[in-house]
Image (tube, rainbow, N blue to C red):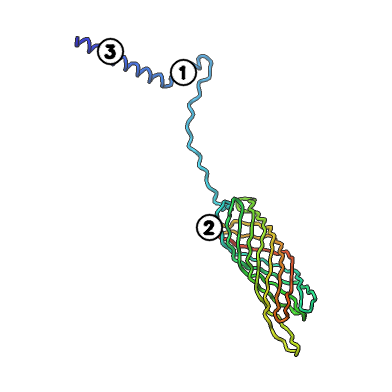
Amino acid sequence: MRRRTKRLTASALAAAACMAVSLTAAAQPDPFADYEAMKRGQAPPPPPAASLPAVVPIPSPEPEVSTAPWKWSFGGRSAFSYTGISNDTLLDQDQSNTTLFFRLTPTVGLTVHERVLVSASFGLLGNNLTREDGSDATAVAGLFEFTGHYMLPVTRRLVFLPGLGIGPYFGSNDRTLRLPDGRKVDEASSTFGVAMSVYGMFGYQLSPTLSVRTGIALYSLFQTERVESADKTLGASAVHVGLPIELHFHVL
């Protein structure tokens, strides 16, 4: 009985081994399949495709303009123009002259949305005014301006930035008054106004953290000057085209 059981067990193991060998052989490609296919005039089956390594893109060493939201930048803004201004005088006569305008303002910017840049700047705004005796007086005021730009990339490093700006300015300047007895005295008068800007600028990315911007800008200002001794408020206005030049550092 025991011998019979051993024989049955050995037969079962041998059958299982044969089945495993046959399955393994079936899974292997037939080495004579190509030869048999060629004898029948058929094209041999294509070889199995070799798996290629994934291609990893190489980042460009060239810096790129960033339009992503929540990116900070710090820099400086300047603008110069040589144009005309009209202003009131104490003699109730309007005066007009050609004057040099300038702006010098530190600036902080933040992209609040994709391609939307908002900036705030505080600095100096200067221009000349003509007085009653025909002399020129320089007026320097503190300018606080908010600016919004929309960023339109042209190339990897070049971007077009149309924008609008508005802000108040305030300051003081000196004027010479002639007293009834013929004496002349200098009096400080206070000024207050509103400056508006329309920008058409291009920015160029010099490095990942540094960019320069320039282009053309249309500036306008409307101001009042208060002369206490004469109890008068004088107005002045100007519209002019200027050349803005800006330098910005970007926080990565």
Would you say the residues marked 1 and 2 are in contact, meaning their CB atoms lie under 8 Å apart?
A: no
Task: Kindly identify which numbered label has been placed on residue 251.
Answer: 2
When the figure is inspected, residue 93 is found, relative to residue 71, above or below; the finding is below
Name which residue lies at 53% across and 17% down: 42
Residue pointed to by mark 1:
33
Badge 1 element: helix
Measure how far apart labels 3 and 2 are at the Cα level.
Answer: 79 Å
When the figure is inspected, residue 204 is found, relative to residue 19, above or below; the finding is below
Q: From the viewer's perspective, tell me whether residue 102 is left or right of residue 47.
A: right
Q: Earlier in the sequence, mark 3 or mark 2?
A: 3
The x and y percentages for residue 31 are: 43, 20
Residue farthest toward the left in the current orientation of the protein: 2
Mark nearest the camera among 3 and 2 is: 2
Residue farthest toward the front in the current orientation of the protein: 231
Measure how far apart labels 1 and 2 are at the Cα level.
Answer: 65 Å
The kind of residue tagged 3 is Ser
> How crowded is the residue under tag 2: few (<14 C-alpha within 10 Å), some, or many (20+)?
few
The kind of residue tagged 2 is Val
